[in-house]
Amino acid sequence: MLEVGRNCSHIEHADRVAILVENDIYFSVVEKALERAERSVLLIGWQFDPRTQLDPLNPPFGAAGEVGHQMRRLARTKPDLKVRLLVWNSPLPIAASQGMFPQRAVQWFNKNPVDLRLVKPLSMGAAHHQKILVIDDRLAFCSGGDISVDRWDTDQHLDEEEHRVLPSGEKRKPRHEVVMMMDGAAAGILGEMARGAWEWVTGQALSQVEVNYDPWPAAVKPTLTDVNVGISQTISGDSGTIETREVETLFLDMIARAEKLIFLENQYFTSPVIAAAIAQRLGEPNGPEVVLVSTGESPSWFDHATMDGARSEVLATLYQADVFGRMSAWHPKTRGGDNIIVHSKVTVIDDRMIRVGSSNLNNRSCGYDTECDVTAERERLDPAIRKVRQHLIAHFLGVADADYAAAEKRLGSVAAAIESLNGSGRMAPISHQRPGWLGRLTARYQIGDPSSPSNAWRPWKRRKLSHRLADEVKQIVSSAHDDGVARSD
């Protein structure tokens, strides 16, 4: 399914790929990889907070355990090691919500010996949203989350977690993240991309580095070996760049060619283009099951106002198109009933393709913000990919992976397996009731969610995308009525 020039910019081989579920695992791996780094550390992020404790469960605590101090120590004690960070120069309201203004992070390092530079968005109002970390051009991470003080959590997602706190002592909500780690040529290409971004921002060309050690952490067992990895981007085309919509094209290709299952784990779900593609599959008598896992309610006021209402409208329309009853949408909760923030961006198709990255299922990620996703592809179903996908569901339900896998095998449906093991209500259906007038208005014009620079400040131009989805669903429902088909709930 991966095709260079269509839905990805590169397809490269990786000897090893690991899917890291939750940031306690990711941060711990990063801490060890940084200690072993010899020549180059290059990080690209939407956000970066040098006060982040990479391993809050173990000493050292305080300043000595902060990633910023670790980076400065390593850069001082290893003369050949260069640590470079590219972080989005976020606008004031967003920066204020992060607790660490980008300019303050720059001053925190003061370019000596760690060099942190700020990335201006390609388009006014757009975000630099990629999350990439490359160690010595031989080990790379691509994720949906940043290294920051509000990102750490375990797969227990406890209601009370003493280590899930801000530097101020304020408690944070439970959060779910997923990262893909890789080596080989795939890691080398992400390193090349990161060096290109550094040159674009700073004017400094960086050479590829060569090292004589294997940076892969010995404690991490690969999820996949000997696999091809596709790298897909979104670049808006402003500021002298070339428009790239590989992220959106790959979403559409994955949806169109899925045979049995489309599993989506994502922070947002508002794109009418992606929803229209799913609606088409739901209208097919023998189409795939579609399962969405997302956050119950966005934590920020802006996202709640712009994304949650639009998601409700999109889901209401999709359930209308779901004439064969194959669509389900869920949000996970803690044992105490608190919402878990689903910040991951994962797509699994037929348990043979797994995609992880920074891209949300919204307009911005498909054509306006700067994004990067990585996709591991097999020719047929891979038990390792199925195991990851089943673990993602089982850990939300609070059941053993084997118990969930047995239920899914017995019932032949992801939704049916979730329902059978959901006695404690750890996964709740996302409401697909149409929102109020404000939510409908937000959805109709995709307020705050432009799909390209051409309509960024012209929301009326985005309305045709909503019309396309509505027309698609009307046609599906009409055909179902003509054929005497009714949804079976």
Image (spheres, rainbow, N blue to C red):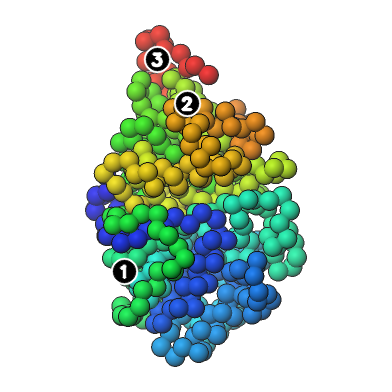
Mark closer to the chain start, 3 or 2: 2
Q: Quadrant of residue 468?
A: top left
The N terminus - image quarter? top left
Say what secondary structure mark 1 lies in. Answer: helix
Q: Position of residue 42 (x, y in %)?
A: 43, 74
Say what secondary structure mark 3 lies in. Answer: helix
Which of the numbered marks, if any, corresponds to residue 78?
Answer: none
User: Which tag is nearer the camera, tag 3 or tag 1?
Assistant: 1
Task: Residue under label 3, please give it.
Answer: 480
Residue at position x 55%, y 85% in the image: 73
- Regarding residue 66, the answer to whether it shows in the image is yes
Q: Position of residue 149 (x, y in %)?
A: 63, 65
User: What amino acid is labelled 3 in the image?
Assistant: Ala
- Regarding residue 438, the answer to whether it shows in the image is no
Task: Residue under label 1, please give it.
Answer: 188
Residue at position x 56%, y 42% in the image: 400
